[in-house]
Image: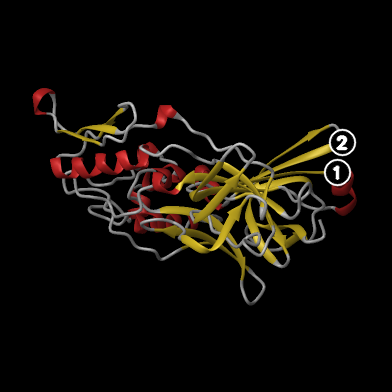
Amino acid sequence: MGRWRFWIQHALTGEVLHPALPLTGVEFGRELNGPGHLSGSLSPKFLRASNASVIPTTSLIYAEADGFLRWGGLIWRIDSEGRELHVEAAGWSSYLMRRHDHHGELGGRGPYVNADPCKIIRDVWAYAQGQPDGNLGVVVDTTTSSAKVGTTAEPWHSYWYETPKLGDHIDHLVGEDGMPQYTCASEYQTNGTVKKRLLLGYPRLGARRTDISFRSGVNIVGAPRPEWDGDEYANVVIGRGSGEGTATRFAVDGVRNGSLRMEYVLELPTVNGTDVLGRRIAAERKKRIWMGEVTEITVRDHPNAPLGSWQIGDDVLVRVDTEWSYWSGWCRITAESYRPSDAPDQATLTLARADSFHYGAPEVA
């Protein structure tokens, strides 16, 4: 626990409410297109003795290791159970789930026609943090994209009378292939203050990393279990685009590879071009023709990949070698979890096969 420190800060004033909160049973981590989480427990005796202010919706909490911030977020819940006080927190984007557009069009910034979703995401945060007592101090990356939201016929709106959650706006803007992606982050600045960031990536968040790797017997702890799921496999993909009945756009992409024919139907009702439909189903077939996946690994601090050397969204080469199987492939880190109370030099990573993601610009349908 010596390398880890948890401290809390007032959300509006920036005042440090306690420099070293003695949390136990801590678990925290970041995630792709989500706020991430933190949970832990305190002794009620500590709160009474120290006068520490752990106040939901007002206190910010940070996890630090070796002088680097690993996580930051807003405390949302405290509840007691026996001799323990449980603390639950979530990253910066969770704040927008409790904020609404009650002025309309993000305070006059919209409506949007052929707009970059990255700009709308920045406008959402600007609107939220421009209201009285609403400035959490989050800085959104200046990333731009070639994706487009809203058309002349159907602009992108945020109507005041629907009082939409600002967090829902963000979720809808990052929820599809070919759209920007984000994760929450915190880092110390040279003057010792904290920079709260929304990292935006396009056409992807993260990068393919050749400088780090995860391997059994080196920095992977235990024996992960590769999964081979035939339900997800297909060597023939059938695409259905726009239209109805005999006017439906239709295409088939398949390969004979010595295996029993397995088909998958990809529904793309907004795709009008047969050429685009063909490219989409060809990409889907390439994803589904390979079986084998490792969805979670636990790694230890090691020169091959020191803790914190990766970013959410990175592709990393993973090699799993057990007594009954060997698996190797590029995996994308979609979430992480640290448990410093139990294993201070380890992290558990949630993975997805890198080729299951679309990294290119969106195609015009």
- The tag on residue 340 is none
The crowd level at tag 1 (other Cα within 10 Å; few <14, some 14-19, many 20+) is some
SS of the residue under disc 1: loop
Q: Is 340 in front, or is 227?
A: 227
Whether residue 151 appears in this view of the structure is yes
* Residue 201, picture quadrant: bottom left
- Three-letter amino acid code of the residue under disc 1: Ser
Q: Can you name the residue that lies furthest to the front here?
A: 258
* Percent x, y of residue 240: 20, 31
* Residue 187, picture quadrant: bottom right
* Percent x, y of residue 89: 65, 46
Whether residue 273 appears in this view of the structure is no
Residue 182, compared with residue 45, is above or below; it is below
* Percent x, y of residue 269: 22, 33
Q: Determine which residue is flagged by label 1.
A: 43
Residue 45, compared with residue 228, is above or below; it is below
* Percent x, y of residue 185: 56, 58
Q: In this view, does 77 lie to the left or right of 238?
A: right
The residue at 68%/57% (across/down) is: 62
Q: Is 337 in front, or is 175?
A: 337
Q: Dots 2 and 1: beta carbons under 8 Å?
A: yes
Calculate the distance from the C-alpha at mark 2 to the C-alpha at mark 1. Answer: 7 Å
- Three-letter amino acid code of the residue under disc 2: Arg
Q: Is residue 288 left or right of residue 305?
A: left
The residue at 35%/50% (across/down) is: 179
Residue 174, compared with residue 203, is above or below; it is above
Q: Can you name the residue that lies furthest to the left here?
A: 247
Q: Is 82 in front, or is 32?
A: 32
The residue at 48%/38% (across/down) is: 292
SS of the residue under disc 2: loop
Q: Determine which residue is flagged by label 2.
A: 83
